[in-house]
Amino acid sequence: MARCTTNEAIALFLNRLALRSPLGEEERAAVLNLPKVSEIDDVERDFVHVGDRVNHACLVVDGLVARFAQIQDGARSFVALHIPGDMGDLFSVVEPNVTWALHALCPTRILRIPHHTLRELAERYPALAMAFWRDTVTDANILAQWTVNIGRKDALASVAHLLAEMAMRHQANGLGNENQYVFPITQADLADAVALTPVHLNRVLKRLREENIAIKEANSVRILDFQRLAYVAEFDPAYLQLTRDDRT
Amino acid sequence: MARCTTNEAIALFLNRLALRSPLGEEERAAVLNLPKVSEIDDVERDFVHVGDRVNHACLVVDGLVARFAQIQDGARSFVALHIPGDMGDLFSVVEPNVTWALHALCPTRILRIPHHTLRELAERYPALAMAFWRDTVTDANILAQWTVNIGRKDALASVAHLLAEMAMRHQANGLGNENQYVFPITQADLADAVALTPVHLNRVLKRLREENIAIKEANSVRILDFQRLAYVAEFDPAYLQLTRDDRT
DNA sequence: CGCATACTTGAAATAGTTCAAAAGACGTGG
DNA sequence: CCACGTCTTTTGAACTATTTCAAGTATGCG
């Protein structure tokens, strides 16, 4: 992804909202003119800690962010991955006490949006309040799917599902296409997203590669056969809510 | 739980909201006077199906409800359990297309609240809009914890965690105390909530029983040693957000 | 009393983990 | 631009938590 400006980043976020929520001109303009946004060009690895109390939400501009929990024996478990255009902790507007840490998985640029500006937008424009709420519901939906993958599918299906999901999400956010996307994540981190060991994840990736289904490279994923990937993953994109519903 | 009236049920829901969100007298009255609520005394087993489009949310009055996905080989995976006082699909107000089915795990009574009345409340009272949003964020938080349990903890810790969580949630909803609560779920269903096989779940329950930690009976759970239960589960109730935060 | 549903137990099989070590990639500084 | 250290990926072999299959015992209900 070419580096983008602050305004372009906010436009990405607006696109994400507008993908799922009907927004008028006024609301769009209000989002694009968000005041007091501060940019951090290369955020530290761990930039939101459990126990913190935050007063801003983070919009990923460039890079990759994980939300995760740390277990006592040192094991980690990811509960979300956020790509450019995602405001991974938008929910913190209503729940500022941090129970899940945020972690940059590669050099990552973010925008910090103060909660009070988001809250003001929500109060002034009910359509935006709904859009924000819907955005967090979508994230919860993705998490529910992760639970299913981790709990009831075998390792191959689980990994395949994540690769397919990330392909669709990149496409939806206007990044890459369904067959190739930037994904600068190590195998160790990827393992924490599907709750496998790095060793086993490596073997699964090898199998996907050898069967010409998908190739995970250092900084990207190339999907050679999306149909077969979706088949082994039992992937149905409905849960991503990629189409807007204006009937409400 | 003694059977309660429609009004008492709505009061339970209001309590749940008020536990986490600051609400004024006006907002409380507005919730208690929700119009056009319809009651279903003994809902059918599967009462919300994938692919449906719903125009009401379901408040559990009595009984137990699971949200779940069905995998191709027939396996199921629960992504939420809802007890009396929970409005399990409140999120459907912003996302009426059903991607997760609802299932009554025992004779269950629900209240159906039309989306448009909830939407009207949210537009009229921003504090309620925030409270609704926050309620769904809490559910997402619980789901995130499930993901961690299923993905990175062993079976004993996973089951212990669920029993501890349900104890706290019952207490928070004003049902039972932290050492005993009504939980009319079969072992097969419980297995789907922690992503284990019924056989293995049975062995884990046996172990918890034999070590005098907790006993799962047909319709209830008795916790003999909450401390030890919490210890083996690595249970920290922070993610349940059981204290209100009025600083926002 | 008999049938259905739920629970319990045993033994064998296996998917995924653990431990260990080698091979490759990558930047940095001499 | 080569040598070195670090981080990441890859592979092998032994191990184990959980599953699978199968059968038996309770429990409840008409």
Image: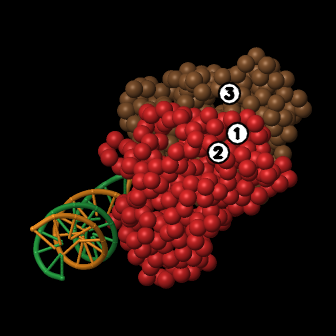
Chain colours: A red, B brown, C orange, D green
Quick one: label 2, few (<14), some, or many (20+) residues within 10 Å?
some
In the image, what residue type sits under mark 2?
A: Leu
Q: Mark 3, mark 1: which one is toward the viewer?
A: 1
Q: Do labels 2 and 3 share a chain?
A: no
Do residues under tags 2 and 3 come within 8 Å of each other at their CB atoms?
A: no
Residue indicated by mark 2 = A34
Q: Mark 1 points at which residue?
A: A121
* Alpha carbon distance from label 3 to label 1: 23 Å
Marked residue chain, label 3: B
Please tell me which residue is depicted at 72% across the width and 28% down the height of the picture. B127
For the residues marked 2 and 1, what is the alpha-carbon distance in whole angstroms?
A: 9 Å
Location of residue B233 in the rendering, given as x and y in whole percent from the top left corner: 41, 37
The answer as to whether the residues below labels 3 and 1 share one chain is no
Which of these two is toward me, B38 or A171? A171
Task: Identify residue for label 3.
Answer: B17
Is label 2 in contact with label 1 (beta carbons under 8 Å)?
yes
Instruction: Name the side, left or right, on which A8 lies relative to B24.
Output: left
Q: What residue type is labelled 1?
A: Leu
Name the residue nearer the viewer: A88 or A229. A88
Task: Tell me the subunit letter for badge 2.
Answer: A
What residue appears at the point 85 percent right and 39 percent down from the top-left corner?
Answer: B116
